[in-house]
Image (spheres, rainbow, N blue to C red):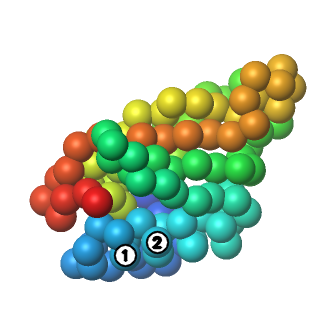
């Protein structure tokens, strides 16, 4: 996805030779520089990335492809399948964070 590629370029390089944990830590750091209020947690099925803030929350209902951009970015950096489990829904109060599950290891593996 071109938007995710552009976002990754603006975030700066993340060394794909690093172990998965270090790549994920760098990614979280870069996302937080962009005000995502991101963190990650380990889980039995693999790591999950949580966004406490979405820069696009006010327009996400009209532009859902922005979630796909974040999903693509996570998958590209972590070389993993990514599934979005929850989406920030400030207008309806349904969810106060986005959650992405990193599903399957690629060539570098997940945690």
Tag 1's secondary structure? helix
What residue sits 58% from the left and 49% below the top? 50
**Neighbour class for label 2 at 10 Å: few (<14), some, many (≥20)?**
some
- Residue 17 shows up from this direction: yes
**Looking at this view, is 25 or 55 the one in front?**
25
**Neighbour class for label 1 at 10 Å: few (<14), some, many (≥20)?**
some
Decide: is 83 above or below 10.
above
What residue sits 75% from the left and 37% below the top? 96
Residues at discs 2 and 1 in contact (Cβ within 8 Å) = yes
Report the Cα–Cα distance between label 2 and label 1.
Answer: 5 Å
Looking at the picture, how far across and down is residue 85, in whole percent? Answer: 51, 30
Per the image, the residue denoted by label 1 is: 22
Please tell me the numbered disc located at residue 7: none
What residue sits 13% from the left and 59% below the top? 107
**Looking at this view, is 96 or 76 the one in front?**
96
Residue 89 location, quadrant? top right
- Where the C terminus falls, by quadrant? bottom left
Residue 85 in the figure: left or right of residue 106: right
**Looking at this view, is 52 or 30 the one in front?**
52
């Amino acid at each position: 996805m071109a938007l995710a590629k552009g976002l990754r370029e603006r975030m700066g390089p993340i060394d794909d030779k690093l172990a998965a944990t270090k790549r994920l830590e760098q990614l979280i750091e870069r996302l937080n520089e962009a005000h995502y209020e991101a963190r990650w947690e380990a889980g039995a099925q693999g790591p999950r990335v949580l966004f406490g803030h979405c820069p696009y929350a006010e327009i996400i209902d009209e532009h859902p492809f922005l979630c796909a951009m974040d999903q693509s970015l996570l998958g590209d950096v972590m070389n993993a399948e990514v599934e979005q489990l929850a989406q920030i829904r400030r207008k309806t109060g349904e969810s106060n964070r986005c959650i992405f599950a990193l599903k399957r290891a690629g060539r570098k593996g997940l945690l």
